[in-house]
Image: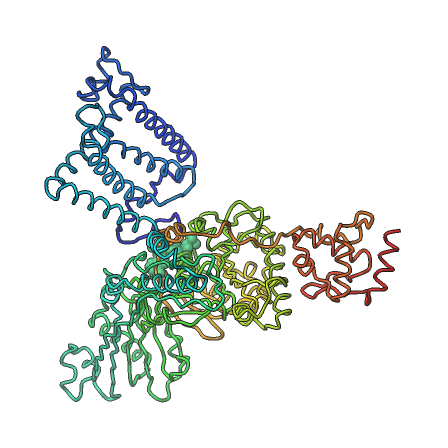
Amino acid sequence: MATKKKSKPKSKRKIFSKPKFLNDERARFILGVTLSLFTIYTCLAFVSFFFTGGADQSKLDIKWLELITDSEIRVENWTGKTGAYLSNLFINKGFGIASFSFLYVMVVLSLRSWGLKIQSIRKSILYTLLFSIWLSIGMAFVFVDSTSDSFLFLGGIHGFFISEWLVSIIGSVGTLFLLILSLLCLLTFGFQNTVGFFKGLVKKKEKSAEAITEDDVLEEEEVAEEITEQPEAIEGVELETPNFESEILLTEEPEAPLEVIEEPVAKEAESEDDVELKIETVREQEETVPINQEPLEDFDPTLDLSRYKFPTIDLLEDHQINNSVVSKEELESNKNKIVETLRHYKIEIVQIKATIGPTVTLYEIVPAPGVRISKIKNLEDDIALSLSALGIRIIAPIPGKGTIGIEVPNQNPEVVSMKGIIASKKFQESKHALPVAMGRTISNETYTLDLAKMPHLLVAGATGQGKSVGLNAIITSLLYKKHPSQLKFVLIDPKKVELSIYSTIEKHFLAKLPDEEEPIITDINKVIATLNSLCIEMDSRYDLLKKAHARNIKEYNTKFVKHKLNPENGHRYLPYIVVIIDEFADLIMTAGKEVEAPIARIAQLARAIGIHMIIATQRPSTNIITGVIKANFPARIAFKVASMIDSRTILDSPGANQLIGRGDMLISTSSDLVRVQCAFVDTPEVEAITDYIMEQQSYPSALMLPEYVGESAESGAGEIDLQKRDALFEEAARLVVTSQQGSTSGIQRRFSIGYNRAGRIVDQLEAAGIVGPFEGSKARQVLIQDEYSLEQLLNNIAN
Ligand SMILES: Nc1ncnc2c1ncn2[C@@H]1O[C@H](COP(=O)(O)OP(=O)(O)OP(=O)(O)O)[C@@H](O)[C@H]1O
């Protein structure tokens, strides 16, 4: 997905999209070295210019080619003629000492080619240019007299002329004010905290402890206001989101001659014998609302990153501009063909109604009494043939409606933009814990899901049918609604390229193993360790819930937020964890049971404690999506697949093989099957969102999952040497006996030690006969009932 070519309208962001040759690591390496060396060279040339510029000045007024070809000319600059020429061009003829700021852009570019992203290229170029212009004018204005007696123009010719021009128009005072004003503008728009900083300066003296809280609330309101203040963006969405819904109601009297159906649409109501064609066109704009994030709660888990701003809607693009509406002719002709085909098989229909969706139109027919439904269902291929269209799907009958549905693909399918879906009222006002905006249904309604309720999702589809776009839509919708303190992703990507785009938001939104360097997990061994570590996290979360007498994460967090749980007892705010595995087939093929077991365990147990999984695969065969996996993933999304068998593997019913691709999907949730056109979000849009998040204040690192030591280390209780007991062994034994609880995480929390060490202590306790053996998700049994027996046992061990 990330690196694939997407058919999308040209956008300004494309200017900076990566050239193809840069996909080759060797090319990136060479480019990185070249850029870095050139940056150092230019820096040396500029510095040298301050010392040697005077001596070289008279030699530099010719063209560069002449300068380098004339062997009689010698320059003093440490970097030779080219360096001297460049420095003169940038410093004296250009922007003065502000030219140094261009080196910053080169540093950003060099770091990029080494794989380090400190700022987006677009922003660094823009800010550097604005800053250079400002500084060169400022320097020329302040050091206006120095130009007459020095070879060096501190503001460059550019600054000199503009400052002179400004002074002549608005005078020196006016120019000074203009410079101050423009500097403030630059700082305000360039850095997020400028306004807060100045406010802080003003208020510093008055601030009492009480005032601090009030001020923070105000700041948050401002943040919320800023997000809501995007009238143009939202208006744009409303204008360009044509939620067109049209219904054609055709009432056919059984005796009516067939020919009348072919009458032009406009005349149809005129004759009594004609088939009556009622066209009800409902042009309904789906309401869009300004992005408005929910107010934060009592104890604020978001306080660490209190100035975090949710991504704005203008980071997304509108792909709907070129969408065309389904014409009446197309509807009429399809209707006629359906009626004719059915009549050919002696099936009379009483009524036909069309609902136009983004990619398919649903023709709902009411057959005459006595017609067997299975007869119509069997005509799928004949209708497809007569309409010469792929992807015809017959739903007989439509559940709860008493009609038969025939889905016919539109000649010009619409692209459903993520922008419209995110801005829709339904998504913005959704109260879901983990809201996911998927796209539009056949009746043009925004389709949203609550991942927390699903509680795990299986996504399948043949290659190139929109799976990656679908995963991006899920991730982006969560990024639009959740604060970094409320949600963490564990991204597993054996294909290595699909999810790499999210590595930049590691410190905001990702979770990983403690000593893991890569934010996205690609290595199979690390996948196994991460999944097992998630099981440990799951157990520890269950322990916390048990102690807090909470049934699920929501209740637990509410208690925590209301200060009913003491952090000193190990309680902490629990963010939701969404585990995404792109290309599950690769994992099963290489590691089989080793990955299947922890996945099944998480899938069975994790719903209450806020760990949710999304697994995607392009090979939906029964050896990949096994019975165990299927049983634990009740919610499934199917993009187009190659065969009916594949469709049955994913959905337990056919249909996915009849989809038309490009984001056309079937979503199955607890016996409901809905056809949805997936919202389209392109890679540059995702990049814009991740850049927006990346540039904000972050946590010092990704969320650390508990450490996991492989099976062998865990199950070695028999070989434990009690002569080499841990220093905390006796204290831990007393804790376990007094509390009558033998959990590793309890010891870990009580003594603030790592999981490994706590695990070793529990193994020693087991070897000493104080606790029973490991029993899966249950806490170990404590075998010693009172402290007296324990002291005796400890004495025996010590001797
Ligand atoms: N919702 C959509 N709306 C419009 N076009 C789409 C949509 N989803 C996918 N496409 C088109 O299909 C192409 C392939 O999509 P995508 O990369 O998501 O496929 P995939 O199933 O992930 O493939 P693979 O398994 O090879 O990674 C996209 O580049 C895009 O042009």
Q: Quadrant of ligand 1?
A: bottom left
Residue 13 on image: x %, y %: 29, 49
Choose between 415 and 189: the one closer to the eye.
Answer: 189
Q: State the image quarter where residue 733 is shown.
A: bottom right
**Where residue 141 appears, x then y in whole percent?**
20, 36
In percent of width and height, residue 464 lies at: 39, 55
Is residue 644 visible in the rendered image? The answer is yes
- Answer with left or right where residue 68 lies relative to residue 477: left
Q: Is residue 394 left or right of residue 137?
A: right
Residue depicted at 28% across the width and 19% down the height = 52
Q: Residue at x 29, y 44 (%)?
A: 127
Q: Residue furthest left?
A: 169
Q: Which of the 4 quarters of the picture holds residue 605?
A: bottom right
- Taking depth in this image into account, of 194 and 37 the one nearest to the observer is 194
Q: Residue at x 27, y 51 (%)?
A: 11
Q: Is the residue 56 above or below the residue 695 in the image?
A: above
Specify the color scheme: rainbow
In front here: 522 or 85?
Answer: 85
Report which quarter residue 99 is drawn in. Answer: top left
Work out whether residue 382 can be spotted. Answer: no
Q: Is residue 429 above or below residue 715?
A: below
Q: Position of residue 59 (x, y in %)?
A: 20, 17
